[in-house]
Each structure stands twice: as structure tokens, then as C-alpha cells.
Image: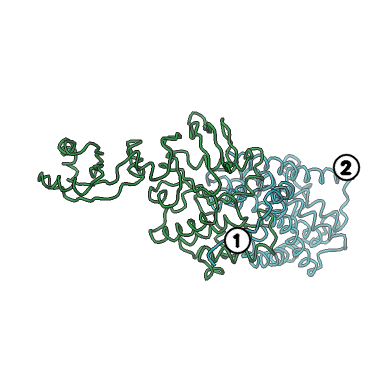
Amino acid sequence: MQRVPVIEARELTKTFGDFTAVDAISFEVAPGESFGLLGPNGAGKSTTMRMIGGTSLRTSGSLRVLGLDPEEHGPEVRASLGVVPQQDALDEELRARDNLIVYGRYFGLPLSYLGPKADELLEFAQLTEKANAKVGALSGGMKRRLTIARGLVNEPRILLLDEPTTGLDPQARHILWDRLFRLKEQGVTLVLTTHFMDEAEQLCDRLVVIDKGRIVAEGSPQELIRQYATREVVEVRFGSARNAEMEGVLRSITERIEVLPDRILLYDDAGESLLDEINRRGLNPLTSLVRRSSLEDVFLRLTGRSLID
Amino acid sequence: MTEVSFTGLDHAALARRTRRWGWLQYAGYRQAAEKPFFWTAFVTALGNPVLYLVAMGLGLGSIVDADVEGVRYLWFVAPGLLVATVVSTGAQFGTWPIFAGFKWQRFYYSAHAAPIEPWQLPLGEGVAISVRLLVQAALFWLVAWAFGAWPSASSLWIVPIAMLAAMAMFAPLMAYAATLEEEGLQFTFVQRLVVMPMFLFAGTLFPLASMPIYLQWIGWLSPMWHGTQLARVASYGLAVPGWLLAVHIVFLVACVVGGLWVAAHTFTRRLVR
């Protein structure tokens, strides 16, 4: 059975005056898929998200969400969407549970539905013990989970997450990823923006890399890594003064090198043996590290810039 | 339980209902979100009239020997104080809370990310605020009644009149507040150069007609004056020609309707980009 895409964008463009925020991007999202928009700040990810919800009007191109044009059918589209914005926008004065209930009012959901739903969502977000705590007293990670719970109050078919873990500590990020992964397992379509490569790798089946409003690559995290990076990366530091001067020597050892201000990245499928070779030649880096390559490396390769500039 | 249940909610039906009743859904949200502030608002609403009536009615009234417009000073001043108090609340609601909804708490963005349409938000705000203004006016009326400030039962009309006058102040201010991107001194100017003169020239403490004619126009532009005049008609039967009565009502209704109409546009411009 052919699966009709839940989101279909063709040549989607958004300009603000002279500035082109989104530049003729096309993509599709299949039902149940976890789809990522990856790119640095200002790449056009959030604008794309807002156009999906019909809260930003496109300049040109076409966009269908659940078969509808979000500009014409805003309420119909948004009734099926769960939105987790970049800023939590919770009611700080209200208790955690009340936040879910009052949010449900936006959808016109009855209290008989919202009461049990709020309890269920608090449990899902691991916030049952904080049900009666004021939001102002919750940690950043808890607020984020509450915002996700809030986005689920209308049983959305698509959950839009704009930078879901920005500003969270590693432990809070992992808890959040776990919750999102469970939603994905339940068949909820996830669309998320992130500028974290590890997040995209953890959560996305497929992603597009956006830079300056354009899609520069598309595929699964593994495909992108295979295509634009190598299996492993050796990071070496010679100190900021020597990094540039070592470039020539290193190029004779391996083909792909990226020289960053603080370190040099060497792309190779066999990182350990490459590092052995560096040491054998007596180059003596101050520090060295062999790691698996990531989407960060893909982005660097595609744009020549680091993601988190 | 670690799963979220999906019960097959009818999203199309939610959207249909929201297209029609979104403004009411938003008003319901607003009322619920105000819950933590209920007691503060309640005590203020009861305390204000006591303070005003003691200070103005009994204090100032004790040195005003003569009747004003043919009635005791307390009877004269009480409708004005009630209207002035409720209109001031309307003016407050029309400034910082609206700004906060865009800038700090961002609840307008949250509501718009749900199925609610931008134009429904100011209407919903208006409905939610109206209820609060109505309650505040009713509480003031009760306290003033205990002070013997009402000569007639028809003074009860002052409650909806005050709400109307307050909405006439609130709606245009809300339309303006929705256009402000940054917090500046705008609201301070509004408070000092718009609301304050409207209060001073609203005929609250003395008849506007006792001012020089070249200053009276300030009062004519003030929802507070129009509301106060209507309130005096209701309370002690102030003699006002029929055409002027109509002007008072039309002015207030026009401010409310015009304010909401402009707000629907300023909210839309702000939220849909």
C-alpha cells in the first residue's frame, strides 16, 4: 500500500523583505516517520515549521499538511498538530497539571476528557509527582517535558518539535529523547528541528540538512554519514599556532582534512591506524581522539562551517 | 504506564467547533489561567470602593456643604467613582497583560499554534475581561450600597454601564498594545497622558460643566465621562436630553466595536508573518 505523505512541500519559499529565509525547499514526510530539519541558527528551520502550522504565510511554492493547505485550513491542520515551540510558553503561575488542562481549552476539549488525559500525560512525561507543583518551580528539563505533554493533549497526528533539547543538560536530553522515541514507536509522526547532530542521529529516520534556507543534503543519518563523511574521524590538536603548519604534512597521510581554529579533523575509515601513522612519523599532537563520525562532520563537509558557530 | 493513549479524537470536529467558538474557548482559557490571582483581584475589588468612598464621599463630602446637581455629594460622587475605578481596571488590562501575551508569556502564540484564529483572541480577551469588570462593578455597587450611596434601585444599571465604559477604554488600548514589539515608555505615556487626563476631566469629583468650555473636550473624548454621565442618569436621574443619552451610548459602543475590530487586525498582523 502506498503511504500518502502527511507533509508535502514543493518549492516552498519564504522571504522577509530582501531576506530569503526559506529558499525553494521540497520535501515529504511519510506517516509515522521521524523527520528532521537540521541546520545552524537562522537556517530557516523554524520558519518552515511555522509555515507547516499555517502561522507563517509562504511567499511561493506549495505545501500540503494532511492533504490540506495550512494557510486556507489553518484550524483544521492545527487541530491535528502538536506543537512544541522553542520557548516553552508555559503558564508559570499555574500548576503543572492545570497547564495541560487550560491548554486543552484552546482546542475546546471538555473537562471530562482533559482531567484523565492530563494525568496520563503527566505520567508519560514522568511528572506525576510534580502534578501540583507550580511551573516556575520546575527544572528546565521538566518544563520541556511538560511542554511536550502539552503538545500531546489533542492526540496529534504530527508532533512538531522546534529545538526540543536546546539548553538542557545531557541527562535531561536523554530522558527527553527516550520519551520522544516512545512516541515514535507508537506511530506518531515527529518533525523536529535541531542543530544538534547527535539528536538527529538519535531521533530521525530521515533528515534534510538546511543551510541559508536551502536543502544541501537529504537522507537517513547513516546514509548522509556514508556519503559525506567516513566511518571514523581522528581529531588532533597541535596548539593553535601549529595547527595550520601541520596541514601539509597531514595531507600527505590522508585525503580529507578539515582545519578548524582549535583542531584538525582527519577523515578515514580506519582511525586507529591513521593515528598510529601520525605518531610513527613523530608529529606528536598535544591531544588526539578517534571517534565515529557524526552528522556534525557531514555538515562541516557540506558547508565548510561548523554547526554551532 | 509509559504510553500515550490515542482514542481517535475527531480533529475535524474540533476544528469546526473552533472556527465558530474559538473566541469563547480562548475566553475560557483566560478565565482558568487567572485562577491563581482570584483572591488578590477579589480583595482589591472590595477594598478599592471602601477606600474611595471613605476618602471622597465622607472626607471630601464633609467639606462640600452644598448639593451638587441637586443631590447630596455622596450620591453625586458614587457613580463617578464606580465608573472611574472599573474603567481604570479596563485600562490596566489593555496594556501590560496584552504585551505580556506576545512578549513574555507568549500565550497568544500558543493559542494560535492550536486551532484558534488570531482575530478570535482579542474577542476572547474582551469576553473574559468583561466578566471580571462586571464582577468588579457589582462588588463596588454592593459596598457603595452599604454606604447609602444609591438613592434608587435603578442604580443597578451602573454595573453594566461601568463595564461598557471600561471596555471602551480596554479595546482600543488592546489594539495598540498588540503593535508594540519592545517594552518602552509607551504605557507610561498612555497612563499619564491619556488615562490620567481622561480621569481628571471625566466629571468624577465635580461636574465637567464647571470646567472652562475650552477644556471640556477632553472629557468628551473620555469613555469615563460618558460612562459617568450614564451612571448618574441611572442612579439619581440626572436630567440629560435624549440625544445626549444616545451620544453617550453610541460613543461607548463605537469605542468597543472599533477597538475590537482594529485589535483583530493588529493581532493578525503580529501573529501571522
Image quadrant occupied by the N terminus of chain B: bottom right
Q: Is the residue marked by circle 1 packed among few (<14), some (14-19), or many (20+) residues within 10 Å? A: some
Image quadrant occupied by the C terminus of chain B: top right
Q: Which structural element holds mark 1? A: loop
Q: Work out whether residue B88 can be spotted.
A: no
Relative vertical location of residue B201 with respect to residue B142 in this rendering, above or below = above
Mark-to-mark CA distance, 1 and 2? 62 Å
Q: Which mark is residue A270?
A: none
User: What residue is shown with label 1?
Assistant: B5
Relative vertical location of residue B144 with respect to residue B194 in this rendering, above or below = below
Q: Earlier in the sequence, mark 1 or mark 2?
A: 1
Q: Is the residue marked by circle 2 packed among few (<14), some (14-19), or many (20+) residues within 10 Å? A: few
**Labels 1 & 2 near each other (Cβ < 8 A):** no
Report the chain shown in green.
A
The colour mode here is: by chain
Report the chain shown in cyan.
B
User: What residue is shown with label 2?
Assistant: B243
At 38% from the left and 50% from the top, the residue drawn is A198
Relative vertical location of residue A23 with respect to residue B30 in this rendering, above or below = above
Q: Residue furthest top?
A: A18
Q: Residue furthest front?
A: A1
As shown in the figure, which amino acid type bears the numbered disc 1? Ser
Query: What percent of the width, then of the height, locates residue B243?
Result: 88, 42
Query: What percent of the width, then of the height, locates residue B73?
Result: 79, 60
Q: Work out whether residue A127 can be spotted.
A: yes
Q: Chain of mark 2?
A: B
Query: What percent of the width, then of the height, locates residue A206?
Result: 45, 44
Towards the viewer: B70 or B104: B104
